[in-house]
Amino acid sequence: MAETQARAKPAKKGTGKKALPPLALAALGIVFGDIGTSPLYAFQTVFAAPHGISPEPDRIYGALSLIFWTITLIVTVKYVLIVMRADNDGEGGIMALTALTMLEKFKTKRRKIIMIGLGVFGAALFYGDSMITPAISVLSAVEGLEIAAPNLTDFVIPIAIAVLVGLFAVQRFGTGKVGRAFGPIMVVWFLAIAAAGLYSIILTPQILQAISPTWAINLFVQEPLIAFLSLGSVILCVTGAEALYADMGHFGKGPIRISWFMAATPALYLNYLGQGALVIRTPSEVSSPFHHLFPDSVQLPMVLLATVATVIASQAVISGAFSLTQQAMRLRYVPRMTVRHTSASSAGQIYLPFVNWVLLISVVLLVIGFQDSSNLAAAYGLAVSGTFVITTLLISVVARQRWKVPRKVVVPVTVFFLIIDIAFFAANMTKFLHGGYFPVLIAVLVFVIFTTWSRGRILLRRKTEEMAMDKDEVIAAVSSDAVVRTPGTRVYLTLNEQVPLALSINIQREHSVAENTIMLAALSAKVPYVDYGDRIKATEWAPGLENFRVYNGFMQPLWTPTDIQKAKERGYDLTGDVIFVVHSIRVQPTKAPGMARWRKVLFAYMMHNASDPARYFRIPNDRVIEYSSVVEI
């Protein structure tokens, strides 16, 4: 296993210098959809109730300075220049960072458990973000109709819901074709918001003073409470920062950095400064400064463009939820569920029906419940700021232990960013009763599911190990005359390295095994991809008895045509007249120690509703024999 994890994944095709421009263009569409549409609501929310500040010049300059330096420090310095260095075989995201943490050595087991637990909770926070992002993004874009076409104001909620339903409905077709159009559309978007912002800056050039950090510092010195509370809204300008890291595996560091520095950053800076200049000139337009940046003649086209851009932003988050769930499944934090690959050439393009429809229902309920993007903004930010804190802690572990950065460098840098992250988190906690509870509630629920499944699997494995035969017992049994060898080939499937329980049942109760018996364990490595040369390990235990292991990265499907071909090259033909044997378990909760009984009940329910083993391994039903057992935990 160690050598499997140590092997790096081969370089991805198309990441050379010639591929940088098209990859950068694609990254602009996929990666920056969320943060690129934040000007729709971030700046105006600083001045909105319940903790909004009044649009006075000094406060406007202070708010803009906070936004400018938040983007610079959190996105550019922290994520683009530091965190993106922590790739797990080219893949990023907080789950990949957590997997890296799992591979590190800690002084105490308790410390490792705490750090991994934080990483899992950070991943859980992402689901709350995945629900709020489509709701607030699409709703804030459609709300432009209130300005462009006031007679359609009553249709804002229905239109937003219709757009969202359409977005989730097309997920089953995959994002490959749509993805190619994302880049050009976002180029138009960034050019439009940059041009509008630049024109407004030209009319009020003194707004450029806001770039100086002294305005932000003065706001904290003169009005500390107002400045602190404003952080709860300022955080909205960097809500897509995690996508920079999470989508790194799709495009690579170079294209993402090029898109950020060459397109996204200048456009965001110009638009935010332009909105500030507009409010300086006309304070009454503070309620919707983004839409008022554009003349009446282009209001309706901008609403349409903003709607398309927010759909793109939502698509990135939805795809991220699919990928995160698949990673969690491979790392044994969630039960088996149906995963459909929507591309023959890209393993990363997947569709999870259950996750898709849960997200849709949640998003629609959010739109109906909160009614307005400014209300949703109160719920937004807490999950993001919590993720920022956790990412800082995890990256400090990786920097110290994996990169061997001196403690005298790691400690002050970590403390600096923790001060910023914790300040944002504390400010967002003031919005807890105004909607901030929602992402926390979702995160706690997901965290309980993750940890219950993980702990339950450990308890279940201990019980099945007691029930199953060990290696020596199996070898002795199949080598004796007491066990009959029947014609044919049977493959016993399992998700761990112990002797499959179904094989033990065959030997102990039926006293027979096939003349060609293969124990096939599908094992998860803590890396995104395992090279095909290392995925398959086969050991002969006895004549006609093979121990066959397939190592899967947490971004790889269980079975691919290449795996089957590699097995055939080694003399194991899994395409002919082969019977696959799977084993399903019904869990019976007890009062035995190990986990709270209510969590055991939850684990039993998840086991009952987990994807059918044969379907999970993608094996035709007419080639499957299934054994079932009741196990008490």
Image (cartoon, rainbow, N blue to C red):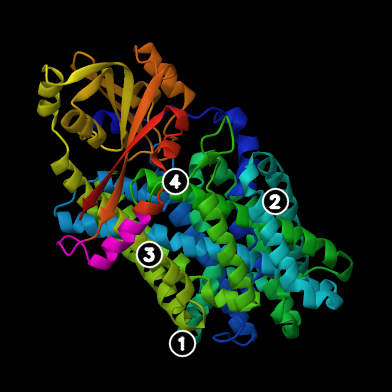
Q: In front here: 276 or 330?
A: 330
| Whether residue 205 can be seen here | no
565 magenta-colored: no
First in residue order: circle 3 vs circle 2: 2
Lateral position of residue 259 relative to residue 563, left or right: right
Q: Residues within 10 Å of mark 1 (few under 14, many from 20)?
A: few
Instruction: Single out the mark in the foreground, 4 or 2.
Output: 4
In the picture of the structure, the residue carrying the numbered disc 3 is 389
> Rounded to the nearest whole Å, what is the CA distance between mark 3 and mark 4?
24 Å
Q: Amino acid at mark 3?
A: Val
Q: Position of residue 456 (x, y in %)?
A: 26, 54
Answer whether labels 4 and 1 touch (C-beta < 8 Å).
no
Q: Which residue is mark 2?
A: 186
Instruction: Give coordinates of residue 85: x percent, y percent.
Output: 41, 45
Read off the residue under disc 4: 326
Left or right side of 197 for 131: left
Residue underneath mark 1:
225
Q: Are marks 2 and 1 in contact (CB under 8 Å)?
A: no
Q: Residue at x 86, y 64 (%)?
A: 298
Where is residue 198 shown, x and y percent of the image? Answer: 74, 63
Q: Residues within 10 Å of mark 4 (few under 14, many from 20)?
A: many
Mark closer to the chain start, 4 or 1: 1
Closest to the camera, between mark 3 and mark 4, is 4
Sequence-first tag of 3 and 4: 4
Identify the residue shown where x is 39% and y is 66%. 445
